[in-house]
Amino acid sequence: MVVKRVLCPARLRKVPPQFNWIDHRLIRDKHICRCSAQALALYLFLVSVADAEGLSYYSEGSIARLLPLDALALSRARQELVAAQLIAYQRPLYQVLSLDEPAVLRQSQPQSIGEIFEQMKGPQK
């Protein structure tokens, strides 16, 4: 068993005052496996610059200058992230999306309280 220890105490990571993070479910739920390295670079960039609502309005030109992506590669990376449901994009806004599955707002048929609780529990493992 590996014993964890801080390797460099002088550089111990602290939560930054701005609002950004990378959700560990990106790895655990294998979202990362569905994307190219270029798409993941764009995702890391967007997570880093997003506000508390996940919004960023960096222009394509600015992103292309900061990441090693030409216009076509940036477009493909963005399409991958949209298809993977990791971001939403409506020029000029990007939104980093929650990794939670979207809640169902309306049901076509009434449900019992028991059915609702079963859905809230999720699939049993």
Image (cartoon, grey):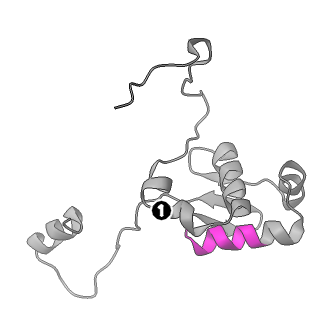
Q: Position of residue 120 (x, y in %)?
A: 22, 64
Find out whether residue 33 is within the magenta segment: no
Image height check: is 52 above or below 80? above
Residue 119 percent coordinates (x, y): 21, 70
Vertical order, 64 against 73 (above or below): above
Q: Which residue is mark 1?
A: 30
Horizontal side of residue 19 vs 57, given as left or right: left
Percent across and percent down for residue 53 are 56, 50
Q: How many marks?
A: 1
21 vs 106, left or right, is right
84 within the magenta span = yes
Q: Is residue 88 above or below residue 9?
A: below
Closer to the camera, 91 or 36?
A: 36
Q: Residue furthest bottom?
A: 108
| Camera-nearest residue between 39 and 75 | 39
Residue at image point 68% right, 68% down:
89
Which residue corresponds to the image point at 41% horizontal and 60% vertical from the top-left?
Answer: 100
Q: Residues within 10 Å of mark 1 (few under 14, many from 20)?
A: few
Quadrant of the rendering where the N terminus is positioned: top left
Residue at 90% from the left image edge and 58% from the top image edge: 61
Image height of 102 relative to 52, above or below: below
Q: Which image quadrant: the C terminus?
A: bottom left
User: In the rendered image, which quarter is residue 124 located in?
Assistant: bottom left
Query: In this image, 116 relative to 5: left or right?
Result: left
Q: Main secondary structure of the magenta part?
A: helix
Name the secondary structure under disc 1: loop
Q: Is residue 56 left or right of residue 26?
A: right
Inspect the image, locate mark 1, and give the three-letter code of the amino acid beneath it: Lys
Magenta residues, as a range?
76-85
* 34, 106: nearer the viewer: 34
**Where, by quadrant of the figure, is residue 8 drawn?**
top right
